[in-house]
Image (cartoon, helix red, strand yellow):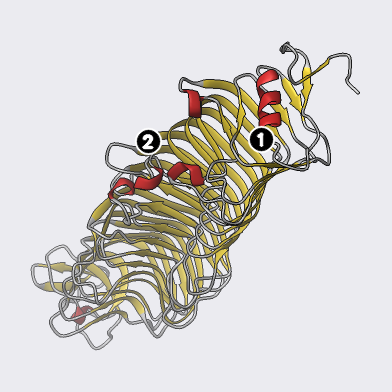
Amino acid sequence: MVAADTVLAGDSPRRAQTVVLPPPSGGDDTTALNTALLAGAGGPIQGHRGARYRVSAPLVVHSGTTLAMSGCTVTLTTGSACNLLTNSAVTTGGRDRDITVVGGTWVRAEGVGGVGPDLHTLRWRRVDGLTLNGLAVETASDKYAISLGDVTDTMVTGIRLAVYSDGVHIQGPAARTRISGIRGSTGDDTVAITPRDWQAYDDVSGPVTDTVIEDVNVASLAALVKVLGGSPETAALRTTVRRVAGVAGNNVIWVGDDTAEWRTTGGRVDDLLVEQVAAAALPGRGGVMHINGSAVGHVRLRGLKADGPDTTLPLVRFSPLVPATLDTLMVEDVEVAELGALPLLVVDAKASIRRLQVERLTAGGASAGAKVIRIAGVVDELTVRTASMTASGDSHLVELSEWAENAAVRQADLSGIRVVGNGGLVTAKAATHTLPRLALDDVQTAGAPWLVDLNTETELLLSNVRIDHSAGGLANVRRSGAVVVRGDGLRSTPGSRGVSVAAGGSVVSYAPDLAVDVSKLVRVDGSRATNTNPRLPCGTGPVRCTGLTWRHLETGATY
């Protein structure tokens, strides 16, 4: 039965009319289906609901076509050695435009086989305006379920996967791609951007720009989202990844290089936003975000919720295989229920970050020795704003790794910090560490033995700092440490020690509110403090150093 606005395959196609695909033959339906697809080129084509087709060669969709396959199943049979569904430009050259496929279950049987790009199931090349909506893809072997390359203005939405390899895979050039509503399971990366791919699949390459990947909830044996830059002549630029849940076999988000081939190493990744991540990796297999790229620019991670790092890998890690510099890493709106032995964020020894910014961080419980941020490499500018931690047993907000001789933070600003329990803010214990400037503003700690533990030459700038713990104080300065304290608004519990200075270390104070035994301070003309040692001739209270003499500002008594 044919509707009034319907034509059958073989009739002259008219764009406004609907072509209905023939029913399954019980054998190989390839020729009949491709005949119908050609007849309906440029208009709507409708599959028979409940139909189960079998094909042995690619089905080819043409420009201007909308193929509606809801309720249909199409299976590519064993030994076919080809794609299941593709567009005409793949075989005839040129470009296609405005292709839409809605619904259908697309199955790649075990042992289909093929060579290179023929191993992909749905393969789209040189298409402007591609929409894939509501498809289910099932593969028992071979490579990518949905392969996109040299495409613009692409929408891939509402996809259910049960696939052997990657789910949705983008090669360059590609512009303005939106992928959303991905469910199911994948044997490799769920969504992958590789501007240039491995040699076997490198049929197209170029920049991948303005990509949005959102609403992904999948069980993957690899990454849930992978963003690579490709080779040095390609790039992944302006990528947004949001609302990612599920389980990853290694890292939830992988950014940078795949060093298995030069084609996937050294390309630039820039302007990457990742937000609203609630996924986790299998225990011992990975973290939430792993950055290993040698040419990564600006990365922003926002809205991360996690139970805590596992026993082997941190949640966020910049770990390049060769020395590399990341322009900006921003980590915002993070909630970690429990922080274990491994940090939330790690900067490895071969890594440098020009600007590292962490804002609105809550670590609900930190076990003994926990570190929120561990730096073994170099950070030019570190900013931590609005962070809270419930700590125990020598926990710290920031640690320069003791084993990393060249760990450096050239400038650090911490503000809006709240620490409850036995935890401090910053520790840099190696004499070779670099921390020339550390600014603390609006800081409150309760139970911290020392706010900072330093073996570095550091200018410590204070503003509105409150220490509620009598057993410790502001700074523990080790043998190679040389700390200069400046600022005001420091409040500490009566009886606190102010500073502890090991033999060989030194502290100079220009902070009038630093309550300390001034005999522990280096005398420098103009320096100030509040003396707490009643045995000194100057007496307790506010003092200033004039020349080499401490003078009480109220009584005039000297020491």
Front-lying residue, 500 or 310: 310
- Residue 184 location, x and y as percent? 66, 55
The residue at which mark 2 appears reads as 205
In the figure, is residue 488 to the left or right of 274? Answer: left
Give 93 or 519, whichever is nearer the viewer.
93
Q: Is residue 19 above or below residue 483?
A: above
Q: Badge 2: how crowded within 10 Å, few (<14), some, or many (20+)? A: many
Task: Find residue 17 and report its horizontal and vertical position in percent.
Answer: 78, 15
Residue 258 placement, left or right of 550: right
Instruction: Tell how many labels.
Output: 2
Q: In this view, does 557 lie to the left or right of 196?
A: left
Q: What residue type is labelled 1?
A: Thr
Q: Residue furthest front?
A: 27
Residue at the image point whose x is 39% and y is 35% from the top: 204
Residue bearing mark 1: 30
Estimate the x, y position of residue 233 in percent, counting from the top left. 28, 36
Of the two numbered discs 2 and 1 on the same chain, state the one appearing first in sequence. 1
Q: How far apart are marks 2 and 1 (CA)?
A: 30 Å
Name the outermost residue toward the right: 1
Give the residue type that dot 2 points to. Ser
Q: What element carries label 2?
A: loop
**In what element is the residue under mark 1?**
helix
- Tag in front: 2 or 1: 1
**Picture residue at 51% right of the left edge, 54% below the top:** 189
Q: Which one is in front, 10 or 305?
A: 10
Q: In which quarter of the image is the C terminus?
A: bottom left
Check residue 97 in the rendering and tell me which mark sits there, or answer none: none
Q: Relative to 119, does residue 394 appear above or below in the rendering?
A: below
